Amino acid sequence: MTEEDFSEEYAEVHELIDRFDKMVRTGGSYFFDSEEYEIIIDYHLDFMNLEHASKAIQLAMRQYPNDVCFKLKKSRYFSLLGKPDVALKLLQTVETKDAEFHIVYGQILSQQGQTAKAIEQFMKAREDEVFEEVATINIALEHERTGNFKSAIEWLQNALKINPYNEYAMSDLSFCYELTNRQEDAIKFYQEFLENNPLNDFAWFNLGEACSSLENYEQALEAYDYALSLNRVFTSAYFNKGNALTCLGRYDDAIEAYKETFALESPDALTYYYLGECYEYKQDYVQALDNYKKSLDLDNMNPDVFIGIAVCLSECSHEKQALEFIERALELDGMNVEYMRMKADILQKTEQYDKAFEVYKKIISLDKSDPEIWMDYANAWMETGDIENGLDVLRSGLVFHPDDAALKYRMSACLVRAGKIQEAVLMFEKALRIDPKGYADAFEYYPQMKDIPVFLDMVE
């Protein structure tokens, strides 16, 4: 099927669906032949519009009471309704054993957890060319449900050989590659696929996503641009393009890409959030706050938005207000260590040390894995002039990170500050053995170290 054939068929189906929905909505009476009813029912079942599907099945069976096809549709309807026993009972009244029978039977078996038997039914359905595509998709889904993503990928690729424009298969394939962390394989597949299907905008989009996940943002941009050249109303491509541009530090271009989505769809909270983030990176805090607040107006349950506002307020020296927004973020995600670190940092800036110490204690109780948090905690003590408590914190940090050079260099600098030069020299030597170039951080933290010849001699 060519892209033109696909687009024409797509338009015809939607015209038919619109005509049926209008009849239901207005209470009119239109004639549909049996094939049209099949299309209408399948459409609504595929999109889980079960109320409309039920209505279509009822009308079709009234108009074509002897058509076995509609018994199969009804059985599938009950299966999707979550009533596999009712669906199976109805299916047993169907005498024909055609491909659609095997599809419906397979779906019922799948609901009952009988994966192997379900796949057997789908394999039988594949023998009919008309049902080969949908049967192949169902086989892929069975493998996904059992966690056999390698086989699922193979079957989804088979589905795309049958119909390169099957967006469901393309989307699910991307999901499986991402879930199994096989993005390099994904890129190779999409590149080969696009050699034969260069006008497939969805494949270009998926290629962009795979490249972005590997931080190949330039390559991702190229793929998104190809997708947009084929489909100028591809909202997700504009959105992802904005993300890639942001990662490249091209904030003005990212802003333009995000704004393109507003021309195609109603503005949403997430896009406003990313716009705010771009303006924040540009240090345009007024525009950043404006977009963050628009995001909150649409969704006040995203803690990252509150943190974004807090960052902007802090940068504008509104520390008290910043703390209020951090608290609101923590109300939504009370175990987020990064939020707590920001809170501790602002408390430290505003010399609310007792409160900052409490936050640092909570952070360490939750996560001891980051050496930097020990240095931040120790630095808060140092700022109060309590060097001994600062050293105790660093010693505790070294218990959990005995081979961390940065911690040892910081410990050395603090020992110098405490006048414990001999201990500082020993610690400095240990740090040098781990990272011979890392001493610059110690000199930056406590420049007086450079006035002590023994340290300069060790780094020359």
Image (cartoon, rainbow, N blue to C red):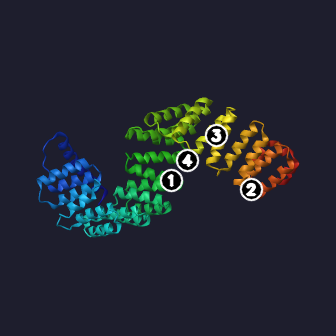
Which label is found at residue 359? 3
Q: Looking at the picture, how far across and down is residue 66, in whole percent?
A: 11, 60
Q: Amino acid at mark 2?
A: Asp
Please tell me in which quadrant of the rendered image residue 24 appears. Answer: top left
Disc 4 target residue: 248
Identify the image quadrant of residue 152: bottom left
Observer-side mark, 2 or 3, equals 3
Question: Between marks 3 and 4, how big is the CA–CA gap?
Answer: 34 Å
Q: Position of residue 26 (x, y in %)?
A: 17, 39
In the image shown, does 12 or 95 lie closer to the viewer? 95
User: Separation of disc 1 and disc 4 at Cα?
Assistant: 11 Å
Q: Point out the tag, 1 or 4, that comes first from the N-terminus.
A: 1
Question: Helix, strand, or loop for circle 2?
Answer: loop
Q: Residues within 10 Å of mark 3 (few under 14, many from 20)?
A: many
Under mark 3, the amino acid is: Val
**Number of residues whose C-alpha sits closer than 10 Å to that of mark 4, classed few (under 14), some (14–19) or many (20 or more):** some
Q: Identify the residue at image location x=62%, y=49%.
A: 367
Q: Which mark is residue 435?
A: 2
